[in-house]
Image (tube, grey):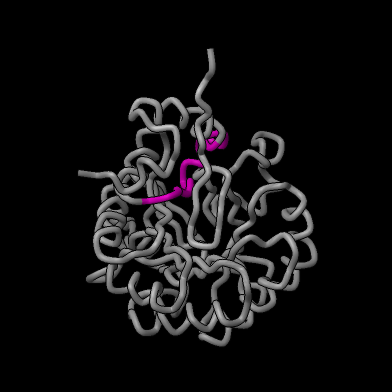
């Protein structure tokens, strides 16, 4: 008797991943923090904390506020800067045997281009994610709210390096499919949908916002319906692979994103309260595919009726 082997491999343009379960930038540190509890080489991909050209101390506290169905954050891209990343963090990440997708953010097209050039030439980098959609820094979403600006920065980054380019987009726009088309026109290998949804929390007794930045990005289960809607709209309108992000915490969430049109997912907020969730999802995927009589992940992507 032979057992059918399930193929979990997924392709995102020029990027091939061993499975569709990735961990989202900003929720997994630089991976060292998780090595004692997560079998890192099993992951489909790791996205370390977003890096910028210079170190950033981030926003004033409070930086996070729990909500009834998620988390508000206004970290402000606190990071060590590209020099420290390349010297101290990338050598460790490159030795894990897992695809490493480096998230970068800049204030100008030139910032993104130079970061892509420097990071893209390093061994161990499988792809670059352009963070065009952080709502917690000045100018953080400028390139993600205008299709032409998105196209310009993606094209410039792609021309600066040879590795695949992913564009992470904000849902805080009128028509996300238009922005995704701009990313596709610029040569993005895939789009990542979605970054956090702009929100705020208020201390009514002090009559002040709770977050030091005033507003922040909402993540977690509360935004999954929005993320699914964005994946569906982009899948219908634009011919480009999609990574689904937003409230993924169990195998049902994963499968919902896959059939809606995502070829992979990123686990974000769930890493905070269930650090081994990614391992469980990888284990559960074959049985979930079998329920749909599928042996290849590609058989179910975008099969929503």
Q: Is residue 191 left or right of residue 272?
A: left
Q: Work out which residue is located at the far front of the displayed protein and give it.
A: 1
Please say whether residue 299 is one of the residues in the magenta stretch. Answer: no
Q: Residue at x 41, y 49 (%)?
A: 71
Q: Nearer the viewer, residue 241 or 98?
A: 241
Q: Work out which residue is located at the far left of the displayed protein and give it.
A: 305
- Residue 8 place in picture, x, y as percent: 51, 39
Q: Residue at x 34, y 60 (%)?
A: 197
The answer to which quarter of the image holds residue 103 is: bottom right
- Residue 161 visible somewhere in the drawing: yes
- Residue 283 place in picture, x, y as percent: 53, 28
Q: Nearer the viewer, residue 274 or 6?
A: 6
- Residue 276 place in picture, x, y as percent: 57, 34
Q: How many marks?
A: 0
Q: Residue at x 61, y 76 (%)?
A: 116
Q: Is residue 207 left or right of residue 254?
A: left
Q: Residue at x 26, y 48 (%)?
A: 225
Q: Nearer the viewer, residue 8 or 72?
A: 8
Stretch in magenta:
262-278
- As drawn, 36 above or below 222: above
- Residue 205 visible somewhere in the drawing: no
- Residue 107 place in picture, x, y as percent: 51, 82
**Placement of the C terminus among the 4 image quadrants:** top left
């Amino acid at each position: 008797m032979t057992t059918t082997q399930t193929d979990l491999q997924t392709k995102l343009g020029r990027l091939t991943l061993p499975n569709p379960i990735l961990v989202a930038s900003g929720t997994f540190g630089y991976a060292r923090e998780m090595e004692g509890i997560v079998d890192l080489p099993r992951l489909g991909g790791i996205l370390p904390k977003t890096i910028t050209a210079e170190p950033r101390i981030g926003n004033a506290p409070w930086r996070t506020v729990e909500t009834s169905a998620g988390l508000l954050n206004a970290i402000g891209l606190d990071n060590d800067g590209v020099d420290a990343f390349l010297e101290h963090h990338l050598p460790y990440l490159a030795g894990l045997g897992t695809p490493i997708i480096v998230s970068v953010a800049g204030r100008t097209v030139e910032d993104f281009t130079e970061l892509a050039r420097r990071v893209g030439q390093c061994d161990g980098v499988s792809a670059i994610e352009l963070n065009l959609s952080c709502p917690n820094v000045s100018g953080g979403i400028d390139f993600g709210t205008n299709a032409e600006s998105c196209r310009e920065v993606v094209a410039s980054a792609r021309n600066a390096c040879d590795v695949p380019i992913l564009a992470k987009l904000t849902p805080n726009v009128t028509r996300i499919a238009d922005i995704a088309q701009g990313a596709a026109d610029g040569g993005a290998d895939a789009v990542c949908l979605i970054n956090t949804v702009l929100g705020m929390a208020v201390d009514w007794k002090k009559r002040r916002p709770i977050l030091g930045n005033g507003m922040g990005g909402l993540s977690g289960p509360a935004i999954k319906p929005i993320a699914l809607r964005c994946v569906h709209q982009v899948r219908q309108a634009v011919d480009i692979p999609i990574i689904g992000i937003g409230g993924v915490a169990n195998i049902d969430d994963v499968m919902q994103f896959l059939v809606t049109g995502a070829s992979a997912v990123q686990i974000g907020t769930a890493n905070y309260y269930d650090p081994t969730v990614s391992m469980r999802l990888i284990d559960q995927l074959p049985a979930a595919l079998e329920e749909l009589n599928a042996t290849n992940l590609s058989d179910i992507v975008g099969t929503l009726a």
